[in-house]
Amino acid sequence: MDPKRELTSVDLAALVRELGTYEGSKVDKAYLYGDDLLRLKMRDFDRGRVELLVEVGERKRAHTIAPERVPDAPGRPPQFAMMLRNRLSGADFAGVEQYEFDRILEFVFEREDGVTRIIAELFGQGNIAITDGEYEVIDCLETVRLKSRTVVPGSRYEFPDSRLNPLTVSREAFDHEMDDSDTDVVRTLATQLNFGGLYAEELCTRAGVEKAMDIEDAGEEEYDRLYEAIDRLAIDLRNGNLEPRLYLEGGDDGDDGDDGEDGDDNDAEDETDTPTRVVDVTPFPLEERTALATEPFETFTAALDDYFFRLDLSDSDAESDPTDQTPDFEEQIAKHQRIIDQQEGAIEGFEQQAEAERERAELLYANYGLVDDILSTVQRAREGDTPWDEIAARFEEGKEQGIEAAEAVVDVDGSEGIVTVEIDGEHVPLVAADGVEKNADRLYTEAKRIAEKKEGALAAIEDTREELAEIERRRDEWEADDGSDEDEAEDEDDGPKRDWLAESSVPIRTNEQWYERFRWFHTSDDFLVIGGRNADQNEELVKKYVERGDKVLHTQAHGGPVTVLKATDPSEASSSDIEIPDSSIEEAAQFAVSYSSVWKDGRYAGDVYVVESDQVSKTPESGEYLEKGGFAVRGDRTYLDDTPVGVAVGIQCEPYTRVIGGPPSAVEGEAVTTIRVEPGRFAQADAAKRIYRRLRERFTDESFVRKIASPDRIQHFLPPGGSRLADD
């Protein structure tokens, strides 16, 4: 059994009640790990330190954790974390809610200067959006631009389309959802009632209803038992009647008692036994899990903390197994293929749903007189203040009299003002206050909305196919390397080359340098190049870091960085005798043009000039004025016309582990893996997130990438303006 890695809607319904007990806690600090793990450090008046984790990546979870299990804070807080600290420091935790029955949690924090909401989307690709009290998005981990919804900074946060909440569903609505299905009972509960597979099976077991029973064979008795099971589940969740359980698989399940006196002591160590590992955690015992060993917990948050902690250990053990160093490419390929199959099924489902809505709309027009008769009858009755119950009774009387319009009415819902009619075997809900045309338009609009969701699914499936192609490429490279002559892996100077991408645990070696606050890279000839990020840094570079022997480069286009090609380190004695190769000058020129307005304007080349350090001065000509960051150049300039833009971002593993970026010819020789970018439509932050995900997928040790990289650090090396990944 694969371990659970995402919390279900039922889990979240149980969780919000426990998390609500921390209301009133004050926020100390916020931390962001990688691009998917948020940690909030809080103080509770009675319980002291409280650590809340929200993860929206491969694992999707939210719970408190024991302070001793808190991961070390990232070395440099990213902008997202700094923004949260500014908004939440000293704020009171005002509560948490689950959005309807969806896998969305909304955390609310209050401070004198306003309200901040953290909305965690624990489904799909996952996301965390930070909004103000009016739901305007301040920032988000992932921007969402679909026809059905948008989540981008500056816009109003849009929740996904509403789904049926089975915990509050009326008996009439329950019957309607069940009757509307064309599959078996368990799949109906999983999809129509939104319980998902495990809890759909659990409800069938508790109700004593055969899971595979065709919905057409299920009668009133089965419906009664299922609805009662749902009602009991809902009551337990509302009242907090929880008995959390952690489930384990493998080893001794602890339920067999004494093994008997005749056993051999050596049998206690069976080399074929797999170690006990966690596979699930639930807010109460499940009959569907009786075959597994269990551990009880006082609270669900404590159970979740222990489960994911032990899952981390289990995953780490699996990664460090010396007998299994080869990445399981086939499993990754199979996983992505399953996702594609699911996405294709969703697309097919959207097509069917959209077509069904259009057919219902056309049925209304095809039976215009009948539908108009029904709606007019209801509208006249309501104008006379006739109660809905009496309207329903009149339709029943009409059925007995054989009146066609009355016979077509199958349900009257006064609470919603909906009359459901049956036409040619199709059930069509009608808004009683509207006419035929408006009801038909509503169905056409719904069909259009579903069709738009299909477009979003088509875009998602293309992303998945790209990821699949990348995994297959890595597999092919691995197999090619594995089959090559071992002698080719020997380097005359350095000995055997290490395949850092395949390492199960990459050691971290950091050594932050003085120049890393500027834009920087080392040329292929190992000369340092630094550039300013803004006018202040341009000013500082010219005043403090331009020394004898250096070369200074700048683009003809306005709005470029001061670029200094260093002949020596500032700690070394400067010299004009050092000859800098043309290859380094060309790479520095490409650096200068790539981080200038040339890239921002979407152009692919620009002109750059090169001068010696002694030609640069902060003293303007008589009668002229130098802006901050500007400088005067005296003497001849050497021009490099039509210098192409070009940037690559990658991860270096030796001698230090860090993100590096700059001209591809320089970076690709130093990094173990790189991704090229070019001018495009993605904002810096979005491009950085895409690069981060790609880099993390390439390493067997994904935790290593999270520790030394982040979207913010990657963004540090991206040019201003829009970008796209060159292989997209």
Image (tube, rainbow, N blue to C red):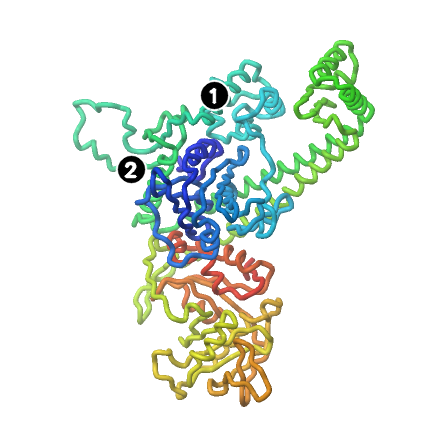
Mark 1 closeness class: few <14, some 14–19, many ≥20 residues within 10 Å: few
Q: Residue at x 39, y 35 (%)?
A: 1
Residue 355 relative to residue 722: left or right: right
- 613 or 487, which lies in front? 613
Q: Where is residue 306 in the image (x, y as percent from the top left)?
A: 34, 38
CB under 8 Å between discs 1 and 2? no
Which quadrant of the rendered structure holds the C terminus? Answer: bottom right
Q: Residue at x 45, y 55 (%)?
A: 82
224, above or below 83, in the image: above
Q: What element carries label 1?
A: helix
Q: Position of residue 608 (x, y in %)?
A: 56, 79
Q: Position of residue 258 (x, y in %)?
A: 21, 23
What is the CA distance from the residue labelled 1 to the residue labelled 2?
A: 36 Å
- Give the amino acid at mark 1: Arg
- Dot 1 or dot 2: first in sequence order is 1
Residue 273 visible here: yes
Disc 1 marks which residue?
Answer: 232
Q: Is mark 2 on a helix, strand or loop?
A: loop
- Per the rendering, the mark at residue 275 is 2
Residue 504 relative to residue 633: left or right: left
